[in-house]
Amino acid sequence: MSHTHPHPPPKFPLPLPALVLALLLIAVPAAAQHGGHGAGHGEGHDAAGHGDDHAAHRAMLEDGAGTRAEAVSHFDIPDLPVRNQDGEELHFYSDLVEGRTVAVNFIFTTCTTICPPMGANFGRLQDELGERLGEDVHLISVSVDPVTDTPPRLKAWAAKFGARDGWTLVTGRRGEIEDLLKALEVFNADIREHSPVVLIGDDERGEWTRAYGLAGPAELATIVDRVQGKGDAGHAGHQDHSAHQGHGQGER
């Protein structure tokens, strides 16, 4: 009678290539599972950051970035063609800035984070300035998205914040607006990351301040007085200077 015996176990280890392959078959699934968890976490983080068009703006609102005001030596402001919210053709420097005291902010109408608060802030600044608005002080909002922001869109956006005479919103051809933003040192290739900045200046005196665009209207009005050389005392008399216009500020 013959008996069948099981094959004895191999006396020698597997050849090296086969051993490496076996180890890889064990290790790769485990690594993939761990890596998948990490990738999923990373992707979620990316979606919260880069996928959110206004992530940078939300961060600015949360940390109050840029709350300090700082003096600016001077600007070489180009006299580029722009269009206001009524569709009128203007030249930025000669028609809106030359010889005037101005507060300039930078917005775009599809922005849903820092731009509406900045618009509301200018709306309240109008009240703070009173009769000085359009006489002694002029407000300007420059669109950083001129392709989208047509004059009618700007006018509708400004109406939400009660824009009155003395607050001009401007758009224009993309290349020229970009040149203007660069001259004013506020250009950002990604409009979603533009800063909440307001430039307050007295062109006649050559005094400019770069301030936080979400600072309170009373604080912005105080800076207006400062660039005009009135100091803090002038802030209490905002309503007393309605007779001054543009170049007429030289009579102070």
Image (cartoon, rainbow, N blue to C red):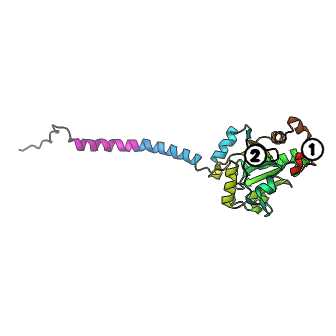
**Closer to us: 78 or 123:** 78
In the current view of this chain or complex, which residue is farthest to the left?
Answer: 1
Quarter of the view holding residue 228: top right
Q: Is residue 232 above or below residue 100?
A: above
The residue range painted magenta reads 2-31
SS of the residue under disc 2: strand
42 in the magenta segment: no
Amino acid on which disc 2 is placed: Leu
Q: Which residue is mark 1?
A: 239
Place of residue 35 in the rendered image (x, y in percent of width and height, measured from the top left): 44, 43
Can residue 157 be seen from the camera position used here? no
Along the horizontal axis of the image, is 226 left or right of 34?
right
Q: Secondary structure at mark 1?
A: helix
Q: In the figure, 206 relative to 178: above or below?
A: above
The residue lying at 75 percent from left, 49 percent from top is 105
Please provide percent x and percent y for residue 231.
85, 36
**Badge 1: residue crowd in 10 Å (few <14, some 14–19, many ≥20):** some
Residue visible at 87% across and 44% down in the picture: 128
Q: Position of residue 44 (x, y in %)?
A: 54, 46
* Quarter of the image that includes the N terminus: top left
The amino acid sitting under disc 1 is Gln
Residue 11 drawn in magenta: yes
Mark identifier at residue 135: none
Determine whether 145 is above or below 230 in the image. below
Q: Earlier in the sequence, mark 2 or mark 1?
A: 2
Reading the image, the residue beneath label 2 is 199
* Front label number (2 vs 1): 2
Q: Are marks 2 and 1 in contact (CB under 8 Å)?
A: no
